[in-house]
Image (cartoon, helix red, strand yellow):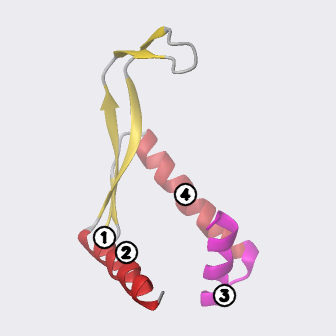
Amino acid sequence: MTKADIIDRIANGTGLTKIDTEAVVDGFFKTIIDALASGNGIEIRGFGSFRVKKKNPRNARNPRTGEKVFVGEHFVPAFKFSKDFKGAVDLGMKTQKDVE
């Protein structure tokens, strides 16, 4: 599923135009990125939580050349699914498997 597919589904479900829906979706994504970039986490009950993880400096290896490379300290976004989210996906996959 792509961003365009998400916009189509939301627009069809809400009656908003695709242009309005795209603005809302883009605003939602930007809000998440801005919050994480400023060091804040986001928790959406029943969905999950976004946070920033600090990665320590380390020595890595370039898989193409085998050359050792130093990777400095950096920060990456992380997402943790809620129990409700995991349960819904599990149930959906089990139901889909039963239909096949």
Question: What's the distance in space between the residues labelled 2 and 1, CA to CA?
Answer: 5 Å
Asked if labels 1 and 2 touch by Cβ distance under 8 angstroms, the answer is: yes
N-terminal-most mark, 3 or 4: 3
The crowd level at tag 1 (other Cα within 10 Å; few <14, some 14-19, many 20+) is: some
Query: Would residue 17 appear left or right of 37 to someone viewing this image?
Result: right
Question: Would you place residue 57 above or below residue 12 in this image?
Answer: above
Q: Residue at x 50, y 8 (%)?
A: 67
> Which residue bears the numbered disc 4?
29
Q: Quadrant of the N terminus?
A: bottom right
Quadrant of residue 91 within the rendered picture:
bottom left
> Which residue bears the numbered disc 3?
12
Query: Would residue 40 appear left or right of 20 to someone viewing this image?
Result: left
* Tag nearer the camera, 3 or 4: 3
Report the amino acid beneath label 3.
Asn
Percent from the top left, x then y, of residue 44? 34, 66
> Which residue bears the numbered disc 1?
86
Asked if labels 1 and 4 touch by Cβ distance under 8 angstroms, the answer is: no
Looking at the rendered structure, the secondary structure element under dot 3 is helix
Looking at the rendered structure, the secondary structure element under dot 1 is helix
* Tag nearer the camera, 4 or 1: 1
